[in-house]
Image: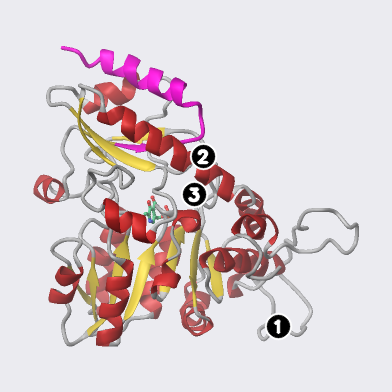
Amino acid sequence: MTPNNDFRTRCVHEGELHDSQHQGSISPLYMGTSYAFNDVPINQYPRYFNTPNQRGLSQKIASLEGAEAGLIFGSGMAAISTALFSHLQAGDHVVFQDDLYGGTRNFIKTEFPKYQISFSFAKDTTVASFEAAIRPNTQGIYIETPSNPTLRIIDLKGIAALAQAHQIWTMIDNTFASPVNQNPIAFGIDVVLHSATKYLGGHSDICAGAVVGSQKTIDRVFSSAKNFGGSLSDATVWLLERSMKTLYLRVQAQNENALQMAHFLDQQSWVERVYYPGLSLHPDHVLAKAQMKGFGGMLSFDLEKGRDAKTFLLALKLIKPTMSLAGIESTALSPRLTSHALLTEEERLAQGITPQLIRFSLGIEAMEDLQADLLQAVEKTNQ
Ligand SMILES: Cc1ncc(COP(=O)(O)O)c(C=O)c1O
């Protein structure tokens, strides 16, 4: 496999292991925790992130992001926490985007103070607001774009240029976009993180994470990762590699469903507002078009005032009112009651999270069935 192979071909074949014993067409699974010394620099061992299956999958994800190297973790949070801690020490400061994934926000708020690491949130999603938050001891900038749940877009090139001017690193959580829709390394971002539990896995049955970047960056992350021990079991690595063969097809179908659904919702009298970067009225539509290859499978919308979000969600029959996202099955939730429940009401409203807001993860079902489900559910919210 070479980088010249098309993205779709690399989804299927990059990093695959050859079955030299039986010539089977898929990667064999090596569950061993003990291997003979050979030509790999460090002895092969699951916690060293270098078993045959772990190395194969790392290569696949790195290739799809246009990175030199990568590491696979036991969860998205293991990837995020290890990447951050490997780049920080006491006295350092990091600038984060304000509308951050709740788990990451909770991680930095509870763990950073224990190690004398400080942080601030940029006031909004503009590059200028990240610049305003930089201090003399700032080591890096951490972003998520599209953001959760209002799908704001951050200028990747602008953030990379700002970081280079200040000689600091940049990290992005690219979970919402997936490598199909956005490759931040091409825009100068240093470290790309994924909750592979989401689009990379795609079937709501795998918990995993990934970090990709230059070989130098990955060596640095590895030096902490082997101490923290957040590696992924080979059985799950194998399943994730299998799942990623269909990544391109799944995400394309989800992109198409989300765009169609956004237009549909935009025309409904019971919907107050739709948040989707593929809509021309989205405040960041032009930027999204410039840096994304597709607008993604996530959207949010506000029900009109007076319609209860919980009643609506519980009335859905096909779309599952669950916490997960990015699976081939459509799911929806109220950020106020679930993903952002730990924030204060004031913090939520500052991020546009109203009691009526519904976050919608589009699956690959038929559009007419999804629309019919929404229409029958909204009937139940009539007073
Ligand atoms: C954007 C984003 N980043 C990171 C995570 C954390 O990933 P995990 O649950 O795999 O640890 C999630 C989980 O929902 C997420 O949505």
Q: Disc 2 and disc 3: Cα gap in Å?
A: 12 Å
Question: Which residue occupies 40% across, 79% down?
Answer: 86
Instruction: Select label 2 or label 1 by which is in front.
Output: 2
Q: Which mark is residue 199?
A: 3
As for residue 377 lying within the magenta part, the answer is yes
Q: Disc 1 and disc 3: Cα gap in Å?
A: 30 Å
* Closest to the observer, 365 or 114: 365
Which residue is labeled 2 in the image?
253
Residue 372: x, y in percent? 39, 17
**Amino acid under disc 2:** Ala
Residue 132: x, y in percent? 12, 75
Mark 1 falls on what kind of element? loop
**Amino acid under disc 3:** Tyr
Relative placement, left or right, of 305 versus 192 is left
Question: Are the residues tagged 2 and 3 within 8 Å (C-beta)?
Answer: no
Dot placed on the residue nearer the N-terminal end, 2 or 3? 3
* Ligand 1 within 8 Å, label 1 CB: no
**Amino acid under disc 1:** Val
Q: Disc 2 and disc 1: Cα gap in Å?
A: 39 Å
Residue 352, compared with residue 378, is above or below; it is: below
Range of magenta residues:
359-383
Observer able to see residue 296: yes
Which corner quadrant of the image does residue 165 belong to? bottom left
Observer able to see residue 82: no
Q: Quadrant of the N terminus?
A: bottom right
Which residue is labeled 1 in the image?
40
As for residue 107 lying within the magenta part, the answer is no
Residue 347: x, y in percent? 13, 51
